[in-house]
Amino acid sequence: MTAPEFRPADGDWLALGRAVLAAQPFSQLLGARLVHLAPGEAELHVPLGPSHLQQGGMAHGGVLGYAADNTLTFAGGTRLGADVVTAEYKICLLRPAIGRTVVARATALHAGRSQAVCRCDLFVLDDADASQLCATALGTIVRSGGR
Amino acid sequence: MTAPEFRPADGDWLALGRAVLAAQPFSQLLGARLVHLAPGEAELHVPLGPSHLQQGGMAHGGVLGYAADNTLTFAGGTRLGADVVTAEYKICLLRPAIGRTVVARATALHAGRSQAVCRCDLFVLDDADASQLCATALGTIVRSGGR
Amino acid sequence: MTAPEFRPADGDWLALGRAVLAAQPFSQLLGARLVHLAPGEAELHVPLGPSHLQQGGMAHGGVLGYAADNTLTFAGGTRLGADVVTAEYKICLLRPAIGRTVVARATALHAGRSQAVCRCDLFVLDDADASQLCATALGTIVRSGGR
Amino acid sequence: MTAPEFRPADGDWLALGRAVLAAQPFSQLLGARLVHLAPGEAELHVPLGPSHLQQGGMAHGGVLGYAADNTLTFAGGTRLGADVVTAEYKICLLRPAIGRTVVARATALHAGRSQAVCRCDLFVLDDADASQLCATALGTIVRSGGR
């Protein structure tokens, strides 16, 4: 089984990534937006509304986990040039994510034949656009069918 | 700073846990249901609808991450007897989660003064109620304010 | 590139595993012994001497990390039937490992085409052979050349 | 229970760190050297000899796990200012570590009241001192007695 290619015919990674994101119902439910995609780099935003919250007014950990997972996958996919899935990740939640947008920025640290290891830092932006690191993740992305 | 207590006055852990879950808007958005809660044990279900999916028809990894995170936290909270937060977890996604319900079962492996280490297995149930392991997670839960 | 086979011609997994362990200078330095190996299961012991310790008299975390890594790899190798390497693991250190032997027991939770996900519990035995869980790990094993 | 202080009376973090390392028999067995220690930063080297190896001539994963664990702990200890232990870490092994020295560099990403989250990149130096990233780790360090 060979994973389908993931490469923009016209070099426009961001347009390709946005088409993938638009095809994910869960990403649409959460209102995620891909704002940057290039080989080895991805940035995804999740504007926070009332339904993204935990009982204490902070973003639910599940929102951060989602953002880490998806952004790691985009960063890894650009390096593997193929349809990919997340094999595993670890996330450290550092402080309550209170603000208006979660910003996830991932970079690929290493890509081999069948897997890419990527890192993702997650920030929360407040109303004044000040940014605070609220979580960090490290994960492994593999070609579809490669688990 | 001391974390508020998390202990049922009447011994009914499940009712207490369900009240916590009902107060989490993100859990309501995802339609999660707590079906078991006892000291060191939690089971949470997420019935899968169209909005939980990934582009390929399987549950989005973010749904599994959410379920792992929340179920680990419930299991750890019962052992620490206090308001808790997830400090970190690692999740391995084993196979596509295709079915009608995600079932997350967590147990606390160890609880110390301020943290509990918990394990969570995630299954997907198909229409015939056959169950398949689709992910597994390991994480650390700490008292609120303890990060 | 194809990973060499890892399968006992005579069905004796333990003998095959012990030959691999004997060929690892670092495992010899630490005095590790493989006591069980079967498809999806491995158990490795590290008798603790003065040079395995941390400043406080407990086993150094590096000894537990070594034991987790090697035991996960053996368990995964039996399921993949090939030369393997550890792609990644996470270990939670639960309590000080004070005793005479570290016992690591790993099981494969899932094996696919090119990777196996394995879990390992680590115990410490005291002089009366009482056993206490001191760490737990979860990791991914891949065929050599598969990273 | 309060963890003993870990702070140099004279501001010389490196001398304090080296005294701690010298008191760890396992670090002596492995020949580890601390080459940098400052608030939130640590660098540790392990010169590779025959006994650090795996069967294939590369450094055993246990050497990388040891180096990650110890370096994360040093970086976290400087930020918490107290005796610390590693609560957990995850390590991704990216490629075979073949060379003459393993170099582990850790930084603290966040430190709260009782835990610090640290990242560690591990490189291998070859005979020409060229450096290659061979592993990366992410972990949580807590005050002694804080697990």
Image: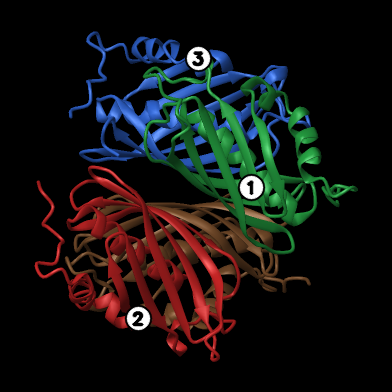
Chain colours: A blue, B green, C red, D brown
Marker disc for residue C30: 2
User: Label 1 is found on which chain of the structure?
Assistant: B
Marker disc for residue A11: none
Q: Quick one: A47 or C33, which is closer to the camera?
A: C33
Tell whether A109 sits left or right of B27.
left
**Residue B125 appears in view:** yes
Disc 2 residue type (three-letter):
Leu
Tell me the residue that label 3 is attached to.
B50
> Callout 3: helix, strand or loop?
helix
Disc 3 residue type (three-letter):
Pro
Disc 1 residue type (three-letter):
Ala
User: Label 3 is found on which chain of the structure?
Assistant: B
Question: Which mark lies nearer to you, 3 or 2?
Answer: 3
Q: Give the CA distance from mark 1 to mark 2.
A: 33 Å
Above or below A38: residue D18:
below
**Residue A33 appears in view:** no
Q: Quick one: C14 or C86, which is closer to the camera?
A: C14
Question: Which mark lies nearer to you, 1 or 3?
Answer: 3
Residue located 67% across and 37% down the image: B35
Residue located 22% across and 10% down the image: A9
Q: Give the CA distance from mark 3 to mark 2.
A: 53 Å
Where in the figure is residue C71, as x and y percent of width and height?
35, 66
> Callout 1: helix, strand or loop?
strand
Where in the figure is residue C113, as x and y percent of width and height?
23, 42
Tell me the residue that label 1 is attached to.
B87
**Residue A109 appears in which quarter of the rendering?**
top left
Q: Give the CA distance from mark 1 to mark 3.
A: 30 Å
Tell whether C113 sits left or right of C66.
left
- Dot 1 alpha-carbon crowd within 10 angstroms: few under 14, some 14 to 19, many 20 or more: many
> Callout 2: helix, strand or loop?
helix
